[in-house]
Each structure stands twice: as C-alpha cells, then as structure tokens.
Amino acid sequence: MGRFRTIVKKIFLQKDTDFVNLHNTHHLNSNKQASNEETISEATFEKTLAELEDCFDLVHRSFNQDEIHIIYLNSLVDSKTLEWEILSPLREMSFDNLEKSFQQSLFKRENNQEDVINGILDGNVSMFAGENIYLINVSGFEERSISQSETETVINGPHDSFNEALKTNVSLIRRRVRSPRLKMIKLSVGEISKTKVLLIYIEGIANMDIVNHLKERIQSVKVDSITDTNVLIQIIDDHQLSPFPQFYTTERPDIAVTKLYAGKIIGLVDDSPNIFCTPSNFFDFFESPDDYNQRWIIGTGVRILRYLALFITLILTAFYVSICTYHYEMIPQSLLQSIMQSRSRVPFPPIFEAILLEIVIELLREAGARLPTKIGQTIGIVGGIVIGQAAVDAGITSNILIIVVAVSAISSFIVPSYIMSASIRIVRFLFILMAGFLGNVGIFFTLGILTIHLTGLTNLSSPYFMPISPTFFKDWMDSIVRGPFYKIKKGQPTMQNDGEKERN
C-alpha cells in the first residue's frame, strides 16, 4: 500500500512538472512573439502621421475621396518631380487602376513602420492606398556644387572635390573607377541622426579581413548623432588619446581613388565633404597628388623637403632655447656676440620668450583661418610684421628668435595635411618645454619618446609607422621617396598580398 502511494505521488509530481514546463514554454513563446511584434511594426497611415506631427515641413494630401493619402516633407522633395510623377497622375487615376499602374513603375512597396519613416526622412513620398503602402523617391536635396578644394590645392592634376551630397561623391568615384569590382557597403550610424556611411573597396585588391573589421567597428558605435567624417574616425580610433591622426582624410576624389587602387578602404559619410581612408600610416600624411603628376626626381626631392620641414618645425625653436640656456659653447663666436646683443634687453628667460612668441604665432594663424580670406591674409601678414617689430623694439623678444619662430611656422605649412600639421604644432610645445628644463638631453629624450609612441600606434591593427617599423624596404619607393612608376607597382593585388604574407 505504501509503495502504491509512492508511485501515485510520483505520477502527480511528474504531471505538475510537465504542466509547469508547458506553461513556461507557452509564456516564453508569448514573450518572443510579443517581442517580434514590437520589433516589426506594421505601418499605417495614422501611425506615420502621428509620428511626424509638429513638423513645419510635413505635408499630407488626400485623393479619390480620401481613399489615397500621401505624406512627405516638402523640404526634402523636388517639387517638379513630385508634380510630374505623383500629383498629376493621382488627379487623373482611379483607385481601381492604382495597383496595376504602380506595379509597372519603380515604386517600392513597404510595410514596416520604421522603414516608412526612414524613407520619408530620405526624401521619399509615402503613399497609402488601402492596405498597400508605397515609397516613391522624389528627393531633391539642396547641395553645393562641385568646386575646388580650398584646403588641398595642387598645381598639376584634377581640381574637383567632394561636397556634402553622398550621391554626388559616389558618382565622382564611379567616374574614375569603371569596374564591377568596386564594391560598397551601406551602414547607418547614430540613434537619432541615422547618418549614412558607405565603405568602398575594390574586390580582389582590398583585404577582406580589414573590411569586415571596419564594418564591425562602425556598427558597434553607439551615439546619438554623427555630424562629420572627422567625428566618426575619432570614435573608431585605436588610440584616442594620441595627438596624431590615425585615419587619413581628404576632400579630393583623385586621392581617394588612388588609395582604392592601393588596396585600401575608403569611407564616405553623408553630409560631409571629407572621406576617410584605412589602413593609413604616418607617411600617408606627407604625400601630395603633385608628387605623382611631375617627374619622379622632383617628386622625391619635394617629399624629402617635407620630412626636413618636419624636423625643423619640431626642433628648431627648442634647439634655440636649449643653446641659449645651457649650451653656449655650441654657438660660433661671431654669432654668439650677435645673440648676446639681441638678448641684452630681453628680461625673460629663453623658454618663456619662445613660448610667448609661439602662442602669438598660433593666435595669428587661427585668426587668419577664421576670418574671411582677404581679411585673414591681411591679418596674418600685417599682424606678424607689426607685432614682431614692436616686440623687438619693446625688448620683449630678440630678433634671432623672431627669425627662428618664423622659419619654424613656415615649415609647418609645408605638411600637406592640415590635421597632421596641427598635431605637429602641439607636439612642438613639448619639445620647447623639455629643452628649457633639460637642454639638448630633453630634446633627444622627447624625440625618443615620440618615436616609441609612433611605432606603437596602429590603424585598425595595422602598424602606423610602416614601412619603417616593421620594415618593408620595397614599400619605401612609395612612402619615404617617390620612385619611378615601374618600381612603385601601385594598385596591383600582388603588392597587398605579399605585404600580408610578410606581416603574418
């Protein structure tokens, strides 16, 4: 009898357990179904109109005795195309012929509420006809015409530049790369802005591991909005605390296409005239299209001159502070007397004098950049001459330092990339401070720290100081110098593949 009770008890316990499991399974399925319903929301006319309410440019029109509704934002559509493609046909079309007419057109049918809203925000007209919803592309964004780049000027070569329209920028690249191997990946960044980002590469040349890595990194960005290319690349940088830019940016389509042929990936951000390129290295920022549009000997000489200018703008002012503070014995006797006479009226130590004058130069530079072009040039020239001469007459600074700072400032302008030039100017102050405290030892110590920092940087896990660290001598012909075209082999897939094999 006791054994029978035990068996009955087990049966009832098993039934209770099965009932609980069935109930939990049903509950999970219900939650999953509810979650899917929340994720995929059916589009309706009422939802769309309610979601876009309180918009000044929202337009809602009805046709065929309120059987057809259209919703659009008049600031994003082309009025002529809207009248020709939609309004005129709807005034003459009956509801019965609507389905048949739209099946013969390029109009897109859509049922997802989120896609309908995004389509309207992209310049489409949303048409509600019974249970069917159509998105008609009649976008007419105002855009700036294609003009010459003001920040990246060249003497020989194309003079067009990107503008803020994504479609126009793609057309400038398509016009130069007429190949089906040109591939594009469309992404969206920003919880509110929904900014479009295009990743462009040439299939068979670009490294697909880097393409996928870049795609995943951009998709992982969680911000409210992205307003420009330079904002996006700062978020996806490997080393965000470094003063040096890790992604190469440009406004020139010819440079972008050159990077594509070299096996790199470029990124376009909607509403931004700049594109970014990856993987980039330190030496990319010292290249210019003029290097390739003239004889290779001249291009090599100009490129070496840029690297010389880099050392001048970093070290010249710091070296002046060092020798005037600690190392008088390094100055020739004839020049030493001139420096002593020039500094005899200056009441400040060399480090304070140099930093003060460098700050004044930076103020003049920023004032010239922010003011209108004609006024900015006048401020830069007249302000530099007047302030420099007045400072010498007042005994605040010496004539020698005026020359040193001027040469250092001019050298910083030789760097083609404005972003890299700004980074170098910031690092220059560190050299001046170390020279004022430790002399030449401080200069060489800072130079060593800078070299270690550059060799430790990466761009999407690719070495930033390549081809010097790690060393690839064959790539020096197109980085350190500009070799003849038959030695560069630019754009051939074998160059990228061989480089990857050596790195692995």
Image (tube, rainbow, N blue to C red):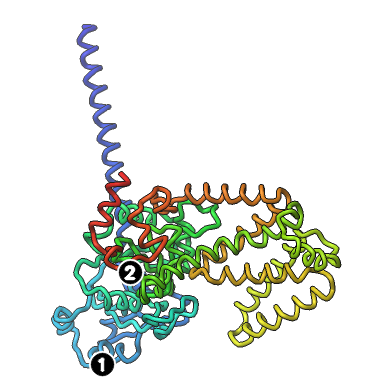
Is residue 359 at all visible to an observer of this figure?
A: yes
Q: Quadrant of the C terminus?
A: top left
The relative height of residue 12 versus residue 43 in the rendered view (above or below) is above
Residue 323 as seen in the image, left or right of residue 240: right
Mark 2 neighbour density, 10 Å: few (under 14) some (14–19) many (20 or more): some
Q: How many marks?
A: 2
Residue 105 appears in which quarter of the rendering? bottom left
Q: What x and y, as percent, mark residue 322?
A: 71, 55
Mark 1 neighbour density, 10 Å: few (under 14) some (14–19) many (20 or more): few
Circles 2 and 1, Cβ within 8 Å, touching? The answer is: no
Q: Read off the residue under disc 2.
A: 258
Label ID, residue 88: 1
Residue 201 appears in which quarter of the rendering? bottom left
Cα gap from disc 2 to disc 1, whole angstroms? 46 Å
Residue sitting nearer the eye, 300 or 380: 300
The relative height of residue 309 versus residue 20 in the rendered view (above or below) is below
Residue at 31 percent across and 66 percent down: it is 260
Residue sitting nearer the eye, 297 or 148: 297
Residue at 24 percent across and 67 percent down: it is 182
Mark closest to the chain's N terminus, 2 or 1:
1
Q: Which amino acid does label 2 sit on?
A: Thr
Q: What x and y, as percent, mark residue 83?
A: 30, 91
Q: What x and y, as percent, mark residue 317?
A: 67, 62
Element class at badge 1: helix
The relative height of residue 12 versus residue 202 in the rendered view (above or below) is above
Residue at 24 percent across and 22 percent down: it is 12
Label ID, residue 284: none
